[in-house]
C-alpha cells in the first residue's frame, strides 16, 4: 500500500517498525514454548517453538532490522525497486525463521528453498553488472545441485525410517540407524547439502565469487543472517534427528572442520578484495562453528548462539563502514581503506574493533565466542582439532590486521567519505553491543 500511494520514504521505517513488533511477539513466545498451533490445528509434527528457536529468531530479527536500516541509503538510487528488494529480504527472514523452528525435514527443505531462491534473485539484482550476473548464476547453479542432494538424502532417510518427523527419525537413528546403509547414506547426503549451504570445505567454491559479485548489502545478508541461520538449522537437524548416529557423522565433520579452518584462513592471507577476504574469513568461521555441531553431547547450543550473535555484529559493523568507503573510492579492494585513520578516525576505529572481534581479540565478543565453542569441543574430547582451531585463529589475525594497517600506516588521498546518519547508527550499535557482550556475556549465554 505504501508503494501504491507513492510514499516510498515510509517503506523502511514501516518495515523496521514491523520487525520491532515481530521481535516483541517472538519474545512473548519464550514463556509459551511448545507445538505450533494454527487455527486450532496442531502443527507440532511440522514446526516447534522452543527456547532454541525463540533465541535464534531474536538475533536474526535484530540483524535483519540493522540490514534494513542500511538498505534505506544503499538503494537510494533505485527507489522504484525498493519495495521489491525489501519484500525479498523479508522472504529471506521468514525462511530463516522456518529453519530455526522445523521439526520435520520437509520444513527444513522448504525453509532452505525460501532463503536460497530469494538469494539467487538478490545476488543478480545488478543486471548490468557482469559480476552480479555471474554471482547470481553461479549461486543458482550450485545451489540447485545442493538442493537436489538434500532431497535425495531426505528421501533415503524417509525410506529407512518411515517418517519425515525429526522425533521419529531420531528414534530410528538411535535404535537401528547404524545398521541401515540406506539411512546412513541419506544422512550423509543431507549433511553434505547443509555443508554446502554453510560454505564448508570442500563445498565452499561458490562463496568467494558470490560474495564478491553480489551487491555489498546482499553480501552482508549472506555473510551474517543467512550463515547463522543455516548453522542453526544444521544444529537442530543433528541434535534433534541424527544424534543417534553421531559416531558416523562426527568423523566426517572433524575432517571437514579441520579443512575448513585451514583452507579458509590460508587463502584469506593472499586476498586483496575486501569482500573476498570476508568470504574466506566466513569460511574459516564456519570451521569454528562446526565445532559446536560436533559438541552435541554437552548441549553446545548456547555457545553456537553466542558465537553467531558476536559474528553477526562484527560483520554487519564492518560492512557498515565498508559500503560508504566503497561508494566514495569506487573500488572494493583492501587499499580502498588506505589512510582512513587520518581522514575519518571514527570510521577507522569502528572497522578496527569489528576486525578485532572477528579475529577473536578481547575484550570484544568475538573472543568469548571462540572461547565458549573451543571449551565445548574440549569437553567433548576434541582436543587436537581445538588446538588446530586456536592455531588457525592466530593465522587469521594477520589478514584482519592487513585492513587495520592499511587504515593507519598508508597515505591518505583527498577523497571525501561521508557516511549517513543511518550507517553511523548501525556502526555504533554493532560495536557497542560487541563490547557489551565481551564484558557481560551472561545476557546471551544464559538464554539456552
Image: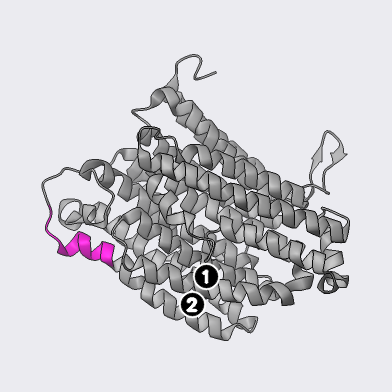
Would you say the magenta stretch is mainly helix, strand or loop? Answer: helix
Which color scheme did the rendering employ for the protein? one colour
Which quadrant of the figure contains the C terminus? bottom right
Residue 70 in the image, given as x and y percentages of width and height: 40, 40
Q: Secondary structure at mark 2?
A: helix
* Residue plotted at (84% across, 69% down): 180
| Mark before the other along the chain sequence, 2 or 1 | 1
- Judge by depth and name the residue closer to the eye, 362 or 239: 239
Residue contact at pointers 2 and 1, CB within 8 angstroms: yes
For residue 340, above or below residue 388:
above
Which quadrant of the figure contains the N terminus? top right
Q: Please report the bounds of the magenta region as a residue range.
A: 402-412
What residue did someone put label 1 on?
Answer: 288
Specify the label residue 337 is tagged with.
none
What residue did someone put label 2 on?
Answer: 389
Residue 354 in the image, given as x and y percentages of width and height: 36, 60
Q: Distance between the Cα atoms at labels 2 and 1?
A: 7 Å
In this rendering, position of residue 391 left or right of residue 103: left
Label 1 packing within 10 angstroms: few (<14), some (14-19), many (20+): many
For residue 361, above or below residue 164:
below
| Extreme-top residue of the structure | 5
- Judge by depth and name the residue closer to the eye, 251 or 400: 251
Residue 166 seen in this snapshot:
no
In this rendering, position of residue 415 left or right of residue 146: left
409 falls in the magenta region: yes
Amino acid at each position: 500500500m505504501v508503494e501504491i500511494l507513492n510514499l516510498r520514504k515510509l517503506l523502511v521505517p514501516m518495515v523496521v517498525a514491523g520487525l520491532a513488533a515481530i521481535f516483541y511477539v517472538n519474545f512473548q513466545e519464550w514463556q509459551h514454548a511448545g507445538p505450533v498451533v494454527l487455527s486450532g490445528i496442531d502443527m507440532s509434527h511440522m514446526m516447534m517453538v522452543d527456547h532454541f528457536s525463540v533465541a535464534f529468531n531474536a538475533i536474526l530479527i535484530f540483524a535483519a532490522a540493522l540490514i534494513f536500516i542500511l538498505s534505506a541509503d544503499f538503494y537510494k538510487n533505485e527507489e522504484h525497486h525498493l519495495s521489491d528488494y525489501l519484500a525479498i529480504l523479508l522472504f529471506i527472514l521468514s525462511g530463516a525463521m522456518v529453519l530455526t523452528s522445523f521439526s520435520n525435514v520437509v520444513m527444513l527443505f522448504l525453509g532452505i528453498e525460501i532463503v536460497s531462491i530469494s538469494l539467487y534473485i538478490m545476488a543478480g539484482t545488478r543486471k548490468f553488472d557482469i559480476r552480479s550476473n555471474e554471482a547470481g548464476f553461479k549461486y543458482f547453479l550450485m545451489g540447485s545441485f545442493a538442493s537436489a542432494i538434500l532431497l535425495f538424502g531426505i528421501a533415503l532417510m524417509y525410506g529407512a525410517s518411515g517418517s519425515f518427523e525429526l522425533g521419529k527419525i531420531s528414534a530410528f537413528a538411535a535404535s537401528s540407524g547404524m545398521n541401515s546403509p540406506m539411512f546412513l547414506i541419506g544422512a550423509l547426503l543431507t549433511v553434505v547439502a547443509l555443508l554446502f549451504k554453510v560454505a564448508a570445505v570442500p563445498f565452499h567454491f561458490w562463496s568467494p565469487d558470490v560474495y564478491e559479485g553480489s551487491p555489498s548489502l546482499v553480501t552482508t545478508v549472506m555473510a551474517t543472517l543467512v550463515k547463522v541461520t543455516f548453522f542453526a538449522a544444521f544444529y537442530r537437524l543433528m541434535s534433534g534427528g541424527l544424534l543417534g548416529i553421531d559416531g558416523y557423522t562426527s568423523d566426517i565433520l572433524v575432517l571437514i572442520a579441520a579443512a575448513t579452518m585451514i583452507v579458509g584462513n590460508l587463502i584469506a592471507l593472499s586476498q586483496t578484495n575486501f569482500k573476498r577476504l570476508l568470504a574466506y574469513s566466513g569460511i574459516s568461521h564456519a570451521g569454528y562453528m562446526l565445532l559446536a555441531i560436533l559438541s552435541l553431547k554437552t548441549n553446545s547450543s548456547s555457545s553456537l548462539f553466542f558465537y553467531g550473535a558476536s559474528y553477526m555484529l562484527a560483520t554487519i559493523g564492518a560492512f557498515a563502514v565498508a559500503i560508504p568507503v566503497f561508494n566514495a573510492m569506487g573500488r572494493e579492494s583492501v587499499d580502498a581503506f588506505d589512510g582512513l585513520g587520518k581522514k575519518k578516525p571514527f570510521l577507522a576505529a569502528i572497522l578496527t574493533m569489528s576486525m578485532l572481534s572477528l579475529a577473536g581479540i578481547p575484550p570484544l565478543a568475538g573472543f568469548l565466542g571462540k572461547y565458549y565453542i573451543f571449551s565445548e569441543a574440549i569437553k567433548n574430547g576434541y582436543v587436537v582439532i581445538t588446538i588446530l582451531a586456536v592455531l588457525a585463529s592466530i593465522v587469521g589475525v594477520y589478514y584482519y590486521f592487513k585492513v587495520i594497517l592499511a587504515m593507519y600506516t598508508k597515505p591518505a588521498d583527498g577523497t571525501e567519505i561521508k557516511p549517513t546518519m543511518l550507517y553511523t547508527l548501525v556502526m555504533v550499535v554493532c560495536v557497542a553491543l560487541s563490547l557489551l557482550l565481551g564484558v557481560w556475556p551472561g545476557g546471551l549465554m544464559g538464554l539456552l
